[in-house]
Amino acid sequence: MSAVPRLLAADRQTAPVAVDWAGYLVWRLRRFGVPGIVGVAALVTCAVGYRGYYVPQRAAVAVLQHRVVTLEGLAREHGERALAASPERAIEALPTRADVPALLGTILEQAHAAGVVLDRGNYDLALVRGGRIARYQLAFPLKAAYPQLRRFIDGTIDAAPALALDVLRFERKTIAETVLEADVRFVVFARNAP
C-alpha cells in the first residue's frame, strides 16, 4: 500500500471525528437555547474580566497599601520631630506684616486674571499670641460666574501659599442665572518683624 492511500484512509478516519465534535457542539448550543448561550457568554466575560482587570488591580492595591504604611511611618517620625521643634520656628516661617501688601497685590492680580472684579473688600486685623502674630481677614463680596470664581480662588491660593480660604458662600437668585453672588474670605497670619 502506497503512502497516498494511507493518508486518505487516515483523513477519512479523522474527518468524521471533527464533524462529530462540531455536530455535538451545535446540538449542545441548541439545547442550551438563547438563555444558556447568554449565560455561558457572561461566564466567559467574567472570567476574562477577572483575569484581565481584577488580578492586576489587586496587585496595584497591594503596592499602594505598602506605600501608605511606609508614608504613615515617615509622617509619624516627622511629626514627632516637628513637635520637638519649638513653635518659634513656625512663627519665623510666617510672612511679615510688611509682606501683606504684596499678598493683596497677588489677590488683585489673580482676580484680574480670572475676570473677577473686586469692587470692595473688608480687611480686619487682630493681634494674637501677645502681639507677636497678626491675623488678617480679607473679605470680598463678589459677583461672577462659577468658573471665574473657581479660577480666582484656586489661582490666589496657588500664587500665595500664606493665604488660606476661611469662608466661602455662594448664592444664586434663580436657577437660570449664571452669575453668582459670593462671599469669599481669606485669612493670613503674619509675624511682627523685630
Image (cartoon, rainbow, N blue to C red):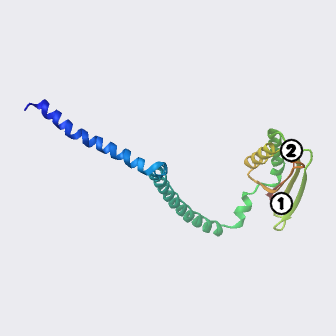
Residue at 20% x, 37% y is 12
Tell me which corner region of the image, top left, top right, bottom left or bottom right, holds residue 9: top left
Whether residue 157 sits left or right of residue 23 in the image: it is right
Amino acid type for the residue under numbered disc 2: Ala
- Of labels 1 and 2, the one closer to you: 2
Q: Is residue 150 visible?
A: yes
Please tell me which residue lies in front, 2 or 138.
Answer: 2
Q: Which residue is mark 2?
A: 176
Evaluate if marks 1 and 2 touch, with contact meaning CB atoms under 8 Å apart. Answer: no
User: Camera-side residue: 33 or 55?
Assistant: 33
Residue identifier under label 1: 135
The amino acid on which the numbered mark 1 sits, given as a three-letter code, is Arg
Relative to 143, is 71 above or below?
A: below
Give x and y (percent) for residue 136: 85, 57
Q: Nearer the viewer, residue 146 or 133?
A: 146
Q: Is residue 120 left or right of residue 68?
A: right
Q: Which disc, if any, is residue 124?
A: none
151 lies above or below 91? above
**In this picture, residue 59 sits left or right of residue 170:** left
Q: Residues within 10 Å of mark 1 (few under 14, many from 20)?
A: some
The location of residue 98, given as percent across then percent down, is 83, 52
Q: Residue at x 59, y 67 (%)?
A: 76
> Residue placed at 46% from the left, 55% from the top?
55
Look at the image and tell me in which quarter the C terminus lies: bottom right
Q: Position of residue 22 (x, y in %)?
A: 33, 42
SS category of the residue bearing label 2: loop
Q: CA distance from mark 1 to mark 2?
A: 39 Å
Secondary structure at badge 1 equals strand
